[in-house]
Image (tube, grey):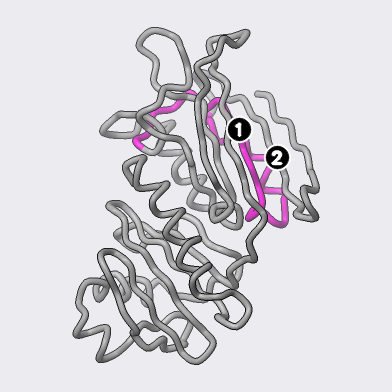
Amino acid sequence: MNVLLRRYILEAKKITVCSAYGPPSGASPCDSVSSIDKLKNRSSLVIGAHVKARSPLWSEVNNADKRGRDMEQFLVRNNLVVINNPSVVTYRRTGSTSPDITVLGSRLLSKLCDWNVLDYPSLSEHSYITFSLDFGEAEFQHGAIIGTDGTVWGKSKTFPATAAELKVFISKFEDLEALAESGIVMGGTKYFYLSSDHDVIRASKGAASLHAMKLKKLYIIALYNNQEFPTPKAANTVEKLGNYLAQYGH
């Protein structure tokens, strides 16, 4: 097991970068990144890890193996999201899948611009992986990515919605009549339905606003103050992230 933690300040934005290697057998791959449990703020975390585990989150497989399920549960517990493209192999050994994963904390998801595996010789069977984070935009007050069953994949520390509110939100997403009649409740605040098109919903209560997008496997929800974060920027940020995740099958 090999774990390396580094803290950086990029354009006054503090992030923590973790590089980890999990053994190919025996111990759980989660052991290789267990050091992050000591971090108070995991929302600004970047992890590059070799996990030797199978999961449809990062490989073109139908089901996760035990090690993959362990890793999936670890990510959910810590509000972390894998940004790999499952169709792109990161490891060049014959018959291999993608044991090298890139993981972001919830606050960094909206800053993600791209993720790529370089077709360039490295000094091992592991390919070079690159990604970009853009800190040029203001941040949402609250945000979350949830699965179609209401499971939280990643969220900001203060995201206020309860599990029950998220399930109701999912059940009403495509029911425009129900949305118009009862709005959307998040953290006890009722947002009045404004409009929708395709897989996007907009709602507000005064300056408090909601912008949500539905993908095949998940929903992205952003809560923000439209006087501090203009609505066009909110829409662009949510839908840019949604379109990025959609192209990788999410």
Q: Is residue 90 left or right of residue 61?
A: right
x, y percent for residue 230: 55, 75
Mark 2 surroundings within 10 Å by alpha-carbon count, few (fewer than 14), some (14 through 19), many (20 or more): some
Residue at 53% across, 10% down: 125
x, y percent for residue 171: 24, 72
Q: Is residue 37 left or right of residue 65?
A: right
- Residue labelled with disc 1: 48
Q: Amino acid at mark 2?
A: Val
Indicate yes or no whether the magenta region holds residue 144: no
For the record, the magenta segment spans 28-56
x, y percent for residue 49: 58, 30
Q: Amino acid at mark 1?
A: Gly
Q: Nearer the viewer, residue 5 or 248?
A: 248
Q: Nearer the viewer, residue 156 or 1?
A: 156
- Residue labelled with disc 2: 17
Q: Are marks 1 and 2 in contact (CB under 8 Å)?
A: yes
**Residue 95 vertical placement versus 189 (above, below):** above
Indicate yes or no whether the magenta region holds residue 55: yes
For marks 1 and 2, give the CA distance. 8 Å
N-terminal-most mark, 1 or 2: 2
**Residue 94 vertical placement versus 126 (above, below):** above
What is the quadrant of the N terminus in the image?
top right
Residue at 22% across, 72% down: 174
Residue at 77% across, 48% down: 10
x, y percent for residue 89: 42, 22
Q: Residue furthest front?
A: 232
Q: Secondary structure at mark 1?
A: strand
Kindly indicate the quadrant of the structure image that contains residue 224.
bottom right
Q: Is residue 24 left or right of residue 185?
A: right
Q: Is residue 188 left or right of residue 32?
A: left
Mark 1 surroundings within 10 Å by alpha-carbon count, few (fewer than 14), some (14 through 19), many (20 or more): some
Q: Which mark is residue 128?
A: none
